[in-house]
Amino acid sequence: MTGIAGDAALSAARAASLRRLHTLVRGINGDLDLERTLDAVARGIVEGLGFEVAVVNLVMPEGHLEVVAVAGSDEARDALMGGRGSREEWDAWLTECTPVGQVLVDYRRQEDDGTAVPTWIPDRPVLEDEDAWHPLDALIAPLTTRSGLVGTISVDLPRDGRRPGPEQLELLEMYAAQASVAIENAQLHTALVARDAERERTLGRLTALVHEAPVAILELDLQGRVRLWNPAAEEMFGWTADEVIGQPNPSVAPDEYEERLGALVRGQVVHRAPARRRRKDGSIVEVEMSSAVLRQPDGTPFGYIGSMIDVTERTLLEQELRTAAYTDPLTGLANRGALRQRLESADEVPAALLLLDMDGFKGVNDTLGHAAGDQVLQQVAARLRRSCRPGDLVVRLGGDEFVVLVDGGEDRVEPLARRLLSVLSEPFSLSEREVTLGCSIGISEPRRTGSATALRDADIAMYAAKLRGKGCFQLFEPPMRVAVLQRAELAEDLRTAVAQGQLALRYHPVIDVPSRRVVGVEALLRWNHPTRGELSPMLFVPLAEESGLINEIGDWVLREACTQLRRWHADLPEHRRLTVSVNLSAVQLKVPDLVEKVAEVLADTGLPPRRLVLELTESVLVDDDGDAVGVLERLRNLGVRLAMDDFGAGFSSLRYLKRLPFDFVKLDRGLLEGVHRDPAALALADAVLGLLSRLGLRTVAEGIETRGQLAVVEGLGCRYGQGFLFGTPMLPQDVPALLTGDGGGVVVPAPREQLENGVERV
Ligand code: C2E
Ligand code: MG
Ligand code: MG
């Protein structure tokens, strides 16, 4: 067929082919589902392009190619469907093929061309004909899109048994081009559908999460109007979603909101920030909230999302715990922790720190019990609170120690200290009785001497106040720090004092008041310090007690005093009834073999036990975790006599005296101080002496300095007396003269003769 007729025939055939192609292409574009599109692509070739078999391979997301559609032959489908070939294998094979336009042919007729891509060789006779289709022939149309190769279409077994001519190849090429577009569309569609499904699922998950979340979740628009309000929010705040959606968030004040949202937009991160919100019923809910700005993909904010946890209960608990951590449970006052915090954090340095220590408190605990002690402490706390201003911090440090941090000006400090001394010297009423205590106050002024050491400085000052005789206050001065250092040095020196013979005894006469005769002497300890001179026991006995050295010292005192008295007895037989009084520390009473030691000294010196008087203060029963009463009884069973020293200075429990095996009670100097001029003091002394005599106890009046006092003491019927009126503590060698002098042991106060310290002397 040549010429115009031939051309016309050809173009008619071509037009028919194109129409068929058009129909085919409509068919493959008819569906957006990928699988159906692939099938349609394969079927289209078999139905309309003149091949018996068509196979579609698709580039998979993993990169390899996979047979995804086979049309025309069940046998081919069974052999090929799902078969895979790597991209490299495919590329290698396709480059071996001969391109004809956009399609590739492989007419090499090689049985084994070494390729590993899925192949199927139809079982057909081989025709010798040059252009006959050979079972090993291959014809491939690559499927390409803008993004490159997406797959291939392989065709086999042309229906006419011939290798396809150029028009057929061109048709195949055009079909492949359309198929690529159809497949790409279907792939896009599938991906979109998958993404939509995933979105739906995500949205479903989020919705369920928001709905079921135990935390309140809310979303707001930029104007602060509620867009989302989950059930937990309904429960937490009391408003339902219906009531609040589209409205400004009712749980928060509008101005606070604006501020907060503005800060969020500016980039502030809010993560678990504490906040207070209002409930529908008006109550407050403490929340911890996290929020974030919601933004469009281009960054423009379109709202806020926030979540809140109700921490009201936790906050309350924390507050309680904090209060408990900073409160003294007994008195409800602030405690040491609170004081430390205030000292560290106060904006303004307090004018003063007053450290108060109750004098004689231990006795209350000890003799009346802890319940009574607690009552006293509570009353102390109440009085302190009443006497202070709201700005002052009143603290119980522990035990019977209190602190007042004074607010305001320095001019308040001393008047306040005086007022506190006065209110605390008032009697405390307990269920069955009244007790009177006092207190000592040490004061530091942090503005002058520093905040960091305020408590320690006040403590040093308080120690000084106690040394000055209790019931007073003392301002801290920096040189006192040195005094404390010196105290430490002194304690160190004391260790060698005993060994180096620096200790000595003075003897202070005890007078039988009716006869004015010396009936005994009290041994009083002195320390001849190599550089500081003679030191008072008031200064170093407490140090010796702290270090335990008091036992060694006490042993020495006892042996020395007994030895000395035994010598006087031997030298002055007419004074064989003379007694010696030895002071014992409470610490010594706790030494297990005290009784044996005393017995040993008596045996060694040969001193009759009756001539030894052991003096103890009430403090022997303080912190008595041992058996003080038992020890006292065993001492008394040795024949030794016991005296209670300093009665009236401490707690002065009369009930307690009855229980203890004392022979003498020594009335503290303070008790007799004003007796000769103050009727009230006289009445008190009278009452005490009356009680003591009714208890069968003999009394010794301490600190008689004037004849006036002596007269009163005598009038009150006190049997014995001691005091500077009869002489100061003297050297042992001066004692015989006192006993055998003009009066022969009878001490008669001489006419008034003023001493420089204002006391009269015999
Ligand atoms: P104390 O046992 O009550 O002794 C009486 C103290 O009062 C003595 O002070 C004495 O010198 C002083 N004194 C006596 N009469 C008067 C007076 O009329 N006016 C004044 N203002 N004071 C007077 P000293 O010797 O300084 O002893 C103080 C305390 O030291 C003693 O009080 C006693 O508790 C303790 N002490 C003394 N020696 C020893 C000892 O060997 N062992 C122990 N554990 N303590 C001792
Ligand atoms: Mg004494
Ligand atoms: Mg005394």
Image (tube, rainbow, N blue to C red):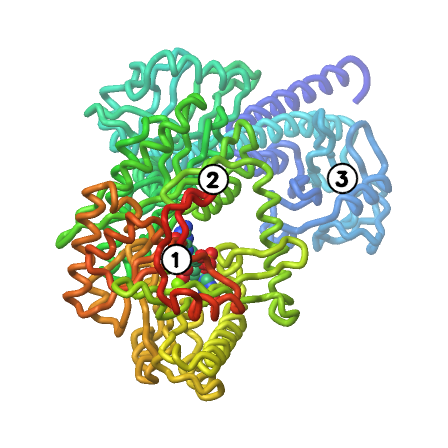
Q: Quadrant of ligand 2?
A: bottom left
Distance from Cα at disc 2 to Cα at disc 3: 93 Å
Q: Which amino acid lies under the numbered mark 2 shown in the image of this protein?
A: Arg
Q: Are marks 2 and 1 in contact (CB under 8 Å)?
A: no
| Circle 3 residue | 139
- Position of residue 468 measured from the top left corner of the image (x, y, whole percent): 44, 45
Could you tell whether 39 is left or right of 126 in the image? left
Which is more toward the observer, 78 or 456? 456
Which is in the foreground here, disc 2 or disc 3? 2
Tell me, yes or no, if residue 442 can be seen here: yes
Q: Which mark is residue 340?
A: 2
Q: Can see residue 548?
A: no
Residue topped by disc 1: 726
The residue nearer to you, when weighing 259 against 27, is: 259
> Within 8 Å: ligand 1 and the Cβ of disc 3?
no
Looking at the image, tell me whether mark 2 or mark 1 is earlier in sequence order: 2
- Image point (31%, 18%), residue name: 249
Residue 544: where, in percent of width, then height? Answer: 52, 63
Left or right of 469? Residue 22 is right
In the rendered view, would you say 734 is above or below 567?
above
Distance from Cα at disc 2 to Cα at disc 1: 52 Å
Rendered location of residue 454, percent (x, y) = 51, 37
Left or right of residue 301, residue 99 in this image? right
Q: Is residue 370 left or right of residue 404?
A: left
For the residue carrying disc 2, how many other residues have a C-alpha within 10 Å: few (<14), some (14-19), or many (20+)? some
| Quarter where residue 279 is shown | top left
Helix or strand or loop: what does disc 3 sit on?
strand
